[in-house]
Amino acid sequence: MTVMPRPSILSVEPYVGGESKVPGVNRVIKLSSNEGAFGPPPGAIRAIAEAAKEAHRYPDGGATALREAIGARFGLDPARIVCGNGSDELLALLILAYGGEGTELVMSAHGFMMYDLTGRWAGCRVIKVPEKNLTADVDGMLAAIGPRTRLVFLANPNNPTGSILPQSEVERLRAGLRDDILLVLDSAYAEYVTRPDYDPGVKLVDAAPNTVMCRTFSKIFGMGGMRLGWCYAPPAIVDVLGRVRGPFNVNAAAMAAGIAALAEPDWVEKSVAHNSEWRGKVAEALTAAGLKVWPSEGNFLLVDFGTPERAKAADAHLRARGLIVRAMGGYGLGQALRVTIGTAEENTLVIEALTAFARGG
Ligand SMILES: *Cc1c(COP(=O)(O)O)cnc(C)c1O
């Protein structure tokens, strides 16, 4: 006999993040984790250095200054914001608090992988609903709801497909769910969206006590290494998260960096303009080279090579040139690669390499 975890835990493979090294290649360009093209905001780098001087002090467990800064920036009540060690932590806490053994979690087939991994180890039955055109299908998701469903997850825009549901469809999803089902809207890429009808989730959170919006500093704010996310939630859910989170779940450097990132002049505007421009250019160039590129509202593109073999060959071709993108086999999209939009120079290298690949074989 030996010590054993709960059986559901061994049903899950450890999460494999985007790679950052290629053996034998000195200079690599990492376009595998949607980390934002410009690195961390300069003010955040200074704030992290400054925070180091106080590293012996415990951080503010209530994240008060950070919640106030987020509230001021997005026009939200700070009392209804909860910060986390990345939004992944908040997604997991919501699953543990509202799901678990005997419950079902509904997500779309190519939704963000953490819902599946965390849902399964928490003991939920995870139901993946087929998509239409790599886009979440509201009717299908509603049809998948059963008496044990407690959680529905929707990333909007979705990673890795880049697809988005119009606000009317998100509202139709919420309206079709029972009141005892928590809808989690994961808006990790909200800042990149330029569609005028887009709402990241605030309207639905304000409208009823059973919707939560999750956000992150890992993408447009370029701070994945700091681990900082937040959610906007109804008061009763804020109360629950306050019970289950660690007392110091967000570290002092991350909080200082988050406040500084929000204050960085023109950061979001500059990043969105760069992303929209280059996402368009890369998509256009790869399409012209004969590749299928799925429409994307995020800072990445899903490029379809037709077969898993051809996607693997393209991946090898990119790697040999030091370009690391994300293989999609784990998402059931082995025929595709996900390419993060990087700097102008990085994007140009991707265009050149994939154009040569498409022409040559
Ligand atoms: C990157 C990502 C996250 C995780 O963000 P962290 O704050 O770094 O944990 C969550 N959801 C989606 C859809 C993402 O792409």
Image (cartoon, grey):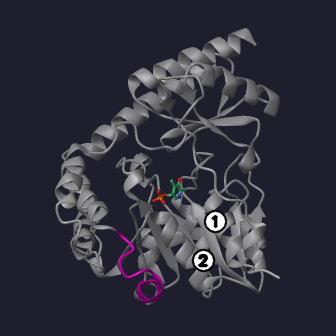
* Lower sequence index among marks 1 and 2: 2
Residue 96, position as x, y percentages in the image: 60, 81
Residue 360 as seen in the image, left or right of residue 194: right
* Secondary element at tag 1: helix
Return the residue found at the far front. 1
Which residue appears at 34% of the width and 36% of the height? 273
Residue 326: image quadrant is top right
Counting other residues with Cα less than 10 Å from the Cα at mark 2, is it few (<14), some (14-19), or many (20 or more)? many
Residue 307 can be seen, yes or no? no
Look at the image and say whether residue 361 sits in the magenta stretch. Answer: no
What's drawn in magenta, residue-wise?
Answer: 238-250
Residue 82, position as x, y percentages in the image: 38, 76
Real-space Cα separation, disc 1 to disc 2, in angstroms = 8 Å
Query: What kind of residue is marked 1?
Result: Tyr
Which residue appears at 52% of the width and 44% of the height? 33
Residue 182, position as x, y percentages in the image: 58, 80
Look at the image and say whether residue 243 sits in the magenta stretch. Answer: yes
Which residue appears at 41% of the width and 84% of the height? 238
Disc ID at residue 115: 1
Pointers 1 and 2 in contact (CB under 8 A)? Answer: yes
**Ligand 1 within 8 A of label 1's CB?**
no
